[in-house]
């Protein structure tokens, strides 16, 4: 069965002219509170679908905030994927394919600014919970700015398509053997190691050699990015806890 990602959005199986469809209605809080951007989702999913990395977009309505795609039989990536060599190899191949997709029509992401924005929104929602992140916020952003300074002279690679939310629930192993990525509402144009950092941040025991494969001149920036991604995920989850699911 097609997975539902975070469970925040409203999912429906509907009948289309050429077979069953998944229609996903966006939760309004995803954009106003969590930082999702639905126009970017449509652009990014179409870019990825053209490269065999996502289901095609059948239809969408930005005003009514829904998107539809073919219903696919499959199962999400296992949570223990880092301990499975075949899964690690599949993830590396997906990352390599994403890096080859240009994304000129997508916005870029200021990771530190996104983290600060989530923290500010959490402060408004639950000041006590937000205060628990204060020390890590200061340290992580300090490390990020220091790493930016050390990496200024490193050659910047052209921006590529970044999924932005590569969690196991958003990675579908289809019954026909294809790997497809779902839920592109955090997609942006960014660095070739953005999605790698997200995977490393979200995995309980990420493959150690993945980080060491990052070029030495980018390593400090990558380590700082992983730390910021962990913080972003924790803040996102804290905010998500206070949002009721769509009916």
Image (cartoon, rainbow, N blue to C red):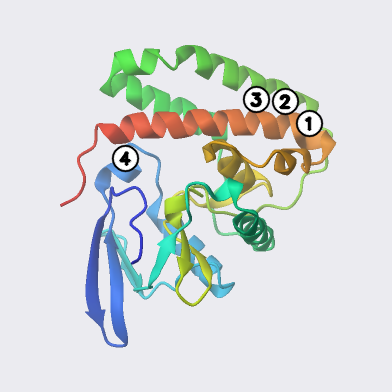
- Whether the residues at callouts 2 and 1 have beta carbons within 8 Å, the answer is yes
Q: What residue is shown with label 3?
A: 144
Picture residue at 67% right of the left edge, 46% below the top: 191
Picture residue at 48% right of the left edge, 65% below the top: 173
Task: Locate residue 121, reporting x and y percent.
Answer: 34, 26
Picture residue at 52% right of the left edge, 31% below the top: 230
Q: What residue is shown with label 2?
A: 147
Please rate how many residues cluster around mark 1, counting C-alpha atoms within 10 Å: few if below 14, some from 14 to 19, many from 20: some
Task: Locate residue 162, reporting x and y percent.
Answer: 58, 52
Q: Is residue 185 visible?
A: no
Q: CA distance from mark 2 to mark 1?
A: 6 Å
Judging from the image, what secondary structure is the residue with disc 2 in? Answer: helix
Q: CA distance from mark 3 to mark 4?
A: 26 Å
Which numbered disc, 4 or 1, marks the residue that appears first in the sequence?
4
Q: Is residue 114 visible?
A: yes
Judging from the image, what secondary structure is the residue with disc 3 in? Answer: helix
Task: Specify the label residue 151 is tagged with.
Answer: 1
Task: Specify the label residue 159 is tagged with.
Answer: none
Task: Locate residue 238, reporting x and y percent.
Answer: 34, 29
Q: CA distance from mark 2 to mark 4?
A: 30 Å
Dividing the picture into quadrants, the one containing residue 208 is top right
Residue lying furthest left:
247
């Amino acid at each position: 069965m097609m997975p539902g990602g975070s469970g925040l959005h409203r999912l429906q199986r509907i009948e289309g002219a050429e077979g069953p469809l998944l229609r996903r209605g966006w939760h309004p809080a995803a954009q106003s509170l969590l930082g999702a951007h639905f126009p970017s989702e449509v652009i990014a999913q179409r870019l990825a679908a053209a490269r065999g990395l996502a289901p095609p977009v059948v239809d969408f309505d930005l005003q009514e905030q829904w998107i539809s795609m073919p219903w696919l039989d499959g199962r999400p990536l296992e949570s223990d994927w880092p301990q499975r060599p075949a899964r690690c190899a599949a993830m590396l191949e997906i990352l390599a394919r994403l890096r080859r997709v240009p994304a000129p029509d997508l916005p870029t992401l200021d990771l530190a600014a996104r983290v600060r924005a989530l923290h500010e929104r959490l402060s408004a929602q639950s000041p006590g919970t937000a205060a628990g992140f204060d020390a890590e916020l200061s340290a992580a952003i300090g490390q990020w700015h220091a790493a930016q300074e050390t990496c200024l002279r490193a050659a910047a690679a052209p921006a590529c398509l970044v999924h932005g939310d590569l969690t196991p629930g958003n990675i579908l192993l289809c019954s026909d053997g294809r790997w497809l990525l779902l839920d592109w509402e955090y997609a942006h144009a960014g660095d070739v190691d953005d999605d790698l950092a997200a995977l490393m941040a979200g995995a309980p025991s990420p493959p150690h050699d993945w980080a060491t494969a990052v070029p030495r001149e980018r390593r400090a920036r990558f380590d700082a990015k992983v730390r910021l991604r962990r913080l972003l995920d924790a803040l996102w989850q804290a905010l998500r806890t206070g949002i009721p699911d769509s009916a």
